Amino acid sequence: MECRLHCGACCIAPSISSSFPNHPNGKAAGERCKNLTEDNLCKLFGKPERPKVCHDFKATEWVCANSSQEALNILTELENLTN
């Protein structure tokens, strides 16, 4: 599955513990990534400074569901289950 353009759920819901551009101490769960554009595209996509966890995330139908809101809900629930 290809990422849904302008979704951004995977750039908002999960926490990221590693340091990366604009987030020297990582990113908290539910915090909008500062590298996400207004139209929900990643400014770091394809760049080496993009966090490994972001690079390794692959869109799947069961996570991305039918809408950006559904994806955000699912990813938020997964994040909550890992705490």
Image (spheres, rainbow, N blue to C red):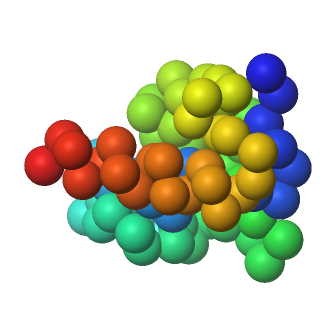
Q: Identify the residue at image location x=57%, y=35%.
A: 63
Q: Residue at x 43, y 33 (%)?
A: 53
Q: Is residue 71 left or right of residue 7?
A: left
Q: Residue at x 84, y 71 (%)?
A: 39
Residue 36 % position (x, y):
67, 66
Quarter of the image with the N terminus is top right
Residue 3 shown left or right of residue 13 in the figure: right
Question: Residue 57: x and y, percent?
Answer: 54, 29
In terms of image quadrants, where is residue 35? Answer: bottom right
Q: Is residue 43 left or right of residue 62?
A: right
Q: Is residue 17 visible?
A: no
Using the image as rendered, state which of residue 25 and residue 33 is in the foreground. 33
Count of marks overlaid on the render: 0
The residue depicted at 78 percent of the width and 78 percent of the height is: 38
Residue 60, image quadrant: top right
Q: Position of residue 10 (x, y in %)?
A: 56, 49
* Image side of residue 17 versus residue 21, left or right: left
* Placement of 68 over or under 49, stated as above or below: below
**Farthest residue, direction left:** 83
Which of the 4 image quadrants contains residue 62?
A: top right
The answer to whether residue 67 shows anywhere in this view is: yes
